[in-house]
Image: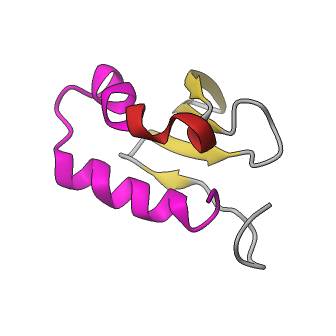
Amino acid sequence: MPMTDTNIAAIQIDATTYIVLHPEASYDLEIRRQHAASSYSVGKMNYKYHHDTFASFVFKIFPEITLLEIHNLQKAINRYIP
C-alpha cells in the first residue's frame, strides 16, 4: 500500500527511462524505457525486501549514474514503498 493517498506516478530517471512502482506485486519496482509509441521493461526487482541492493541494480543498467542520483531516486521511491 502506498504511504500517501496520491496516485503513484512514474519516477523519471532520464529522458527515456522511468521507474514504475507496483506495491501489490511480487516485483514491486520496474524500470521501463520509452521507445517511440511503446515502452518495454529493462529490469524488475522486489524493492520492499531487497532495497539494500537497489544501488547495484540501477548501476548495472546505468553505469553513468551517480550515488547522489541513486539516493534521490530511493527517497522518491520510499514515499510509496515502506
Task: Look at the picture and state if 16 lies above or below 26.
Answer: below
Q: How far across and down, in percent of the image, does residue 47 sit?
A: 57, 39
Q: State the quadrant of the C terminus.
A: bottom right
Q: Does 79 sit left or right of 62 as displayed?
A: right
Q: Is residue 34 magenta?
A: no
Q: How far across and down, in percent of the image, does residue 13 sit?
A: 39, 47
Residue extending farthest to the bottom is: 5
The secondary structure that dominates the magenta segment is helix
Of 49 and 30, nearer the camera is: 49
**The quadrant where residue 58 appears:** top left
Q: Does 35 sit left or right of 40 as displayed?
A: left
Of 4 and 48, nearer the camera is: 48
Magenta residue span: 54-82
Q: Is residue 76 magenta?
A: yes
Of 52 and 29, nearer the camera is: 52
| Colouring rule applied to residues | secondary structure
Number of callouts in the render? 0
Task: Look at the picture and state if 37 lies above or below 10.
Answer: above
Q: Residue at x 70, y 63 (%)?
A: 8
Q: State the quadrant of the N terminus.
A: bottom right
Q: Does 74 sit left or right of 29 as displayed?
A: left
Q: Residue at x 74, y 65 (%)?
A: 2
Of 20 and 74, nearer the camera is: 74
Q: Residue at x 52, y 34 (%)?
A: 50
Q: Residue at x 54, y 44 (%)?
A: 19
**The quadrant where residue 16 appears:** top left
Q: How far across and down, in percent of the image, does residue 54 sit?
A: 41, 36
Task: Look at the picture and state if 47 lies above or below 27.
Answer: below
Q: Does 8 sit left or right of 63 as displayed?
A: right
